[in-house]
Image (cartoon, rainbow, N blue to C red):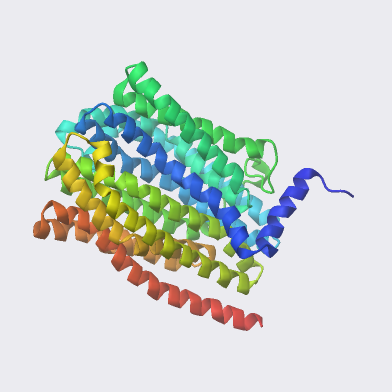
Amino acid sequence: MSQTPKELQQKKRIVMMAEGPIGRALFKLSAPAVAGMIVMAIYNIVDTIFVSFLRDTTAIAATGIVFPMFQLIGAVGLTFGMGAASVISRRLGAGDHEGAHRAAATAFYSALVVGIVLSMLGAVFIQPLLRVFGATPNILAEATLYGRVIIGGSVFLVVNMTLNNLLRAEGASGHSSLGQMIGAVLNIILDPIFIFTLDMGITGAAVATVIAQAASTLFLLSFYLRRKGTLHPISFRHLHPTLTTYRAIMTLGFPTFVRQILGSLSFGIINNAAGGFGDGAIAAVSITFRVFMLIFMSMMGLAQGLQPLVGYNYGAKAFDRVHATIRLVIQLAVVGGALAGVTLIVLSRPVMTFFTPQNAEVIAMGTFAMRVFSIALVPAGLVILFGGIFQALGDGRSALLLAASQQGLYLIPMVFLLPPLFGVNGVFLAQPAGFILAFLTGLILMKRSYAKLKREEGARS
């Protein structure tokens, strides 16, 4: 019996992960994932760029206050998506297609329900949440206008992040990234219309973002509505909300949630610490984090791209392909992080001047912040990739330890320890210091994980 075009495409994706050249397979899986994650960062950068045209430092700071909340809710989608993606990749590699369908459907419907609940709660309790994340009295009014819309529509973000990872788990990275790009382009088009043409100001930026997210999510969902994938996440028949299914998803998704929630909380703590030095310091932090999110999201995209490749071959016991993929991504992280770091050290002042051309204080603080961040880009990128490798190998414990140590054990204490010693510069030094310490922890955990992998490889031979 001849195969349909859909079946041939599905088979082609599986063959690529099982037998294709490592470099080419990693590129095909990672390039769309990197593009998609950069697009996610662009959503917030675009808002900041257009809001900066209002020439209002308070408005820029307001978008920075809402950003960690946006990240935190997105972390829920990443938790279900990345946890299920790791399970799906390994089960597809082991030939357990029904188990892959169950993980996908359970992750999708769980993300949908939780996303709706978080959107409602976030919109209702927006002002108390903004105060927790560092909103000063001067910033609170504008942050409320922006945050109530962004958080109220964040169900699309949660479902979007889950669908992205489900698509990548079965090798359909192209459709995933195209959906993200559609959202980004739409956001760029709509931002000036809502902010300036319709004179909605900062609220218009939020409305544009939510509409763009909704369009992107519907496009991603269309892949499964047209039954083009190997998986069937929207089928109630495969919905399997049992303790066993959730344990499999959460064992590997929970480290992502811990990393993201601690990252959001630490960002809130950094905003609070920066607030002690004025709204300009918050604006400097906001701009710096937005720029570096482009690089961090790129590394997260590479981590997402490696997961189906490593996970599938680990499930199939093809250990030589697992080792080759890990070596390649580490080399890419070192070279890419070094090049990005040098570039941003040189261009830090022009970048800050672009966002705040008339505020010398913010430019000076942001230039220093960008330069110290740049020094830590290589260890920061490797920390992100170590976490992706652990999740791909099913080593949830190491992924959780790394996530908890980087944001909780190291970064948050640094925010309290360094500002009394170095003033506002101490606020900017905390994040790089946390990444460097986490990198050292990651090396120890990688050594342990690699030893386990070698034992399994020896038992196989």
Figure label count: 0
Quadrant into which the C terminus falls: bottom right
Asked whether the viewer can see residue 122, the reply is yes
Task: Indicate the position of residue 330 as horizontal and vertical percent values.
Answer: 47, 67
Which residue lies at the image location 60% right of the left edge and 42% below the top edge?
175
Which residue lies at the image location 39% right of the left edge and 31% below the top edge?
152
In front: 329, or 405? 329
> In the picture shown, does residue 296 fall above or below 449?
above
Give the residue at the far top of this rendering. Answer: 198
Instruction: Decide if residue 459 is on the left or right side of residue 374.
Output: right
> In the picture shown, does residue 85 fall above or below 194?
below
In front: 12, or 446? 12
> In the picture shown, does residue 131 fall above or below 20?
above
Task: Indicate the position of residue 437 as horizontal and vertical percent values.
Answer: 29, 68
Which residue lies at the image location 71% right of the left edge and 59% below the top edge?
15
> In the picture shown, does residue 287 fall above or below 205?
below
Task: Indicate the position of residue 112 as horizontal and vertical percent values.
Answer: 51, 39
Asked whether the viewer can see residue 128, the reply is no
Task: Indicate the position of residue 354 as horizontal and vertical percent values.
Answer: 27, 38
Instruction: Decide if residue 438 is on the left or right side of residue 453.
Output: left
Instruction: Decide if residue 93 is on the left or right side of residue 402.
Output: right
Instruction: Decide if residue 232 is on the left or right side of residue 242.
Output: right
